Amino acid sequence: MKLVLRKRENISRRAAVLVPMISFVVALLFGAILLAVSGANPWVTYAAMFGGAFGSLYGLSEVLVKTTPLLLTALGVTLAFKMRFWNIGAEGQLTMGAVAATGVALYWARDLPGWTLLPLAIVAGCLAGALWAGGPAILKATLNVDETLTTLMLNYVAVLYSEHLYYVAWRAEGYNSGTERIPQVAWLPRLFGRAHAGLLIGLALAVVLWLVFRYTRWGFELKIIGSSPTAARYLGINIGRHIVMTLLISGALSGLAGASEVLGLAHRLQQGISVGYGYTAIIIAWMAQLNPLGVVFVAFVMAALLVGGDQIQMKMRLPASVGLVLQGMLLIPLLAGSIFREYALEVVKPSHGLDPDEGEAAIHG
Amino acid sequence: MAMGDHEARSRDQTPVLQMRGIVKRFPGVLANDHVDLDLYRGEVLALLGENGAGKSTLMNVLIGLYRADAGEIFVRGQRVHIRSPRDAARLGIGMVHQNFMLIPTMTVAQNIILGMDALPFVPPMSEIEQRIRELSERYHLPVDPSAYIWQLSVGEQQRVEILKLLYRGAEILILDEPTAVLTPQEARKLGRVLDIMREEGKATIFITHKMGEVMAFSNRVCVLRRGRVVAVKRTSDTTPRELARLMVGRDVLFRLERKPVPVGDVVLELQDVYAENDKGLPALRGVSLTVRRGEILGIAGVAGNGQQELAEVITGLREVKGGRILIDGRDVTNRSPLEVIQSGVSHIPADRMGMGAVGEMPVADNLVMKGYRTPPLSRQGVLQRRRIIEFARSMIQLFQIATPSPQTYVKFLSGGNIQKTILAREIDACAGLLVAVYPSRGLDVGATEAVRQRLLEQREAGRGVLLISEDLDELLSVADRIAVLYEGRVMGILPAEEADVETLGLLMAGEDMLLTAAQTVGGLD
């Protein structure tokens, strides 16, 4: 008897749903082994994580707080990945969005009517993120410069620049780090707990993006470019223009994530404005298989893992990074399992008792 | 019967290699259809056939890259199962591929021993280099074992590939179109190498589609057509003329009706067009031609003589270095692909899955990839999904595309149905000119007929067709006029009624070169 991978007649939708779910379980199992090795009871730990994330209204609001930037950056990444542009610079684009929103809210506040502040800060955040992604996009479109390197390197530039601002240039009097608090008129409204309106913006954009992918010429062209650039060129699609346009929007979404972190949550630029959301966004985009509605769901789960990790740190004195470890481990079974979308696993029984390794047995048997 | 034949042969000499009843299917294509092949020690066997005739498939089966669907292989009389090139190497079978498998940053000697079984942890390089020198002297394959691959010319790299096989003790050598990368002088030297291999008792299979090389280099020739062996002959008993006929097939496959159609205005005009290939070498050197509405202009030529580049300059995919291209009298030289599409030009590209269709997307989406920009398929940038499905259903019916549903991904279709999908889209979008590149290559009989029928319909509908094909049979049965492209130049344009397979075949191969090659090597035999 042996197992054979056979190509399916069509893409399996069942596998598309099952594979991420099973991957999640596999990641939990591997995580359990790690926990057991480090002396913790996996069952108790997972129960504590779950309880921490969903056991109270506070926990749930914290999950939503973390869902917001994950959702927005993952949507940005999804957009870029749809055309196989490997934008791994969401972290930097988010950071620049936070910087620009803070700058507008703090330093333009004096001269403008109060009600303009919030929309202006949001727009500034989007523009900064767009700029940060637009540079690599233009380099890619004109000189074919590899985007993975440029977007990644710009993350460091953005993060270090923001540090310079909140440690030195914009540091508030009497503090070691962090800017002044932005005026309350520029704050995003809170929903409950610390969850804020940024989440609603994210949800709305997820729906918009889903509609764009499914129903617009633009989405159609992105998909063609992503599937086959050669075909796209042959079909008369201007690839360079698409790269730049799409990346501007991709970066704007991550910039918006940064702006909403400042305007909705921190109310100032300070350390920890991003804790790797832009990288987690890459995992989320893949797990959701570049489906914007799937991104909503996956971002929520990932946020719960983060919050649960924080909880066990407090309650069980285990490192909070357990949540991150689980996140990282999710990707391995996920990528390995994607083969089942196109291939079905079949059990082949040998006929007439011939050696099953004899590939030509059936012909001569 | 096969056994009796086998016994009869073994009385004088046992073949070192026998392939029996080899069958290899690809989706929609029967690449090898019960192929038998014998190879003897001390001979050079030419494997002759057009592109898509199944030569490479057969050799890939022998070398273990493909697994045959049916058939048996015997080496030195023993039944063998070859599952990988490593298996083949152990049996003394080696192949020089068209794309060399060498590592540029390593030396000749390192490349030669790379991947060999039973090599000591620290290989004795000076000994190895000494052996390589001996071999290269014996076989007239001069090359410096300590030179780096990147320092070598293409011809020298080919020598390294051959040495690699000889060093490993290969008895059966397969050379896949070895002269394609060589200058005429180098090709002549290769002929000398083949002679020595013959004297040393090696058995060589020489893949080619050039009649001249068969005559110059081989003892016997095996002609493949559409996956079948159509003839095995002693080279001395045949002529280039006969081989051309065998290779292309004299019998007209289909009785296609070519209605008389009034010829209309010029739809495509090329004026002294120059272009380069991907490597920056001249590919088109002053091509001038015209296509009128209501006619099919066929382009004949051996692959790599500028056909690909010709199609690409017309469709805006390749830069024009000199000259002008006019569509309906309007200058479209170096315009974007979109502008060319919008002037009514459709294109059936040679590379179906890479360029013509997107495998990762549904049939319906692929069918609208030209028409999605305008109503009714899209309005104000919004796709009309229901209209798209309706449109797709009607195209699937009209062009008889066999697909489970319009939502099926194209990559799950057979080759013939992928081509029908492309054909449907391009013909529907075509307003003036259809550029078709190898439209029936590798397709089965039914799909081939459908493709040719559609081309004729375009002509009757008053559109112009530029048909690039290597299948002379196709050109003769479909085209009104045939232009022969050789080394980027139009050698001549003949009305189809006045052309015949032999003339075209010899023109395509470059008649003058043929004669000289035959004379030069003829004396060595």
Image: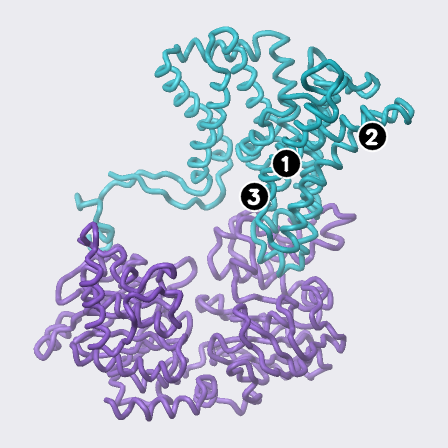
Q: Earlier in the sequence, mark 2 or mark 1?
A: 2
Callout 2: helix, strand or loop? helix
3D distance between C-alphas at marks 3 and 2: 31 Å
How far apart are the alpha carbons under marks 2 and 1? 24 Å
**Tag shown at residue A184:** none
Q: Position of residue B174 (x, y in %)?
A: 28, 70
| Chain of the residue on which disc 3 is drawn | A
Q: Are marks 1 and 3 on the same chain?
A: yes
Q: How busy is the neighbourhood of tag 2: few (under 14 within 10 Å), some, or many (20 plus)?
A: some
Could you tell me residue B431's position as x and y percent?
A: 71, 69
The amino acid type found where label 1 is placed reads: Val
Q: Which residue is mark 1?
A: A157
Q: Nearer the viewer, residue A143 or B218?
A: A143
Residue behind mark 3: A148
**Foreground pick, B491 / B298:** B491
Residue under numbered circle 2? A120
- In the drawing, does residue B380 fall left or right of residue A318? right
In this rendering, the count of numbered labels is 3
Residue type at tag 3 = Thr
> Mark 3 or mark 2: which comes first in sequence?
2
Characterize the local packing of mark 3: few (<14), some (14-19) or many (20 or more) Cα atoms within 10 angstroms: some
Q: Is residue B66 above or below residue A279?
A: below
Instruction: Report if residue B476 is visible in the image.
Output: no
- Image position of A171 with respect to B195: above or below: above
SS category of the residue bearing label 3: helix
| Co-location on one chain, circles 3 and 2 | yes
Quarter of the view holding residue A329: top left
Q: Are marks 3 and 2 in contact (CB under 8 Å)?
A: no
The residue sitting at 29% across, 80% down in the picture is: B231
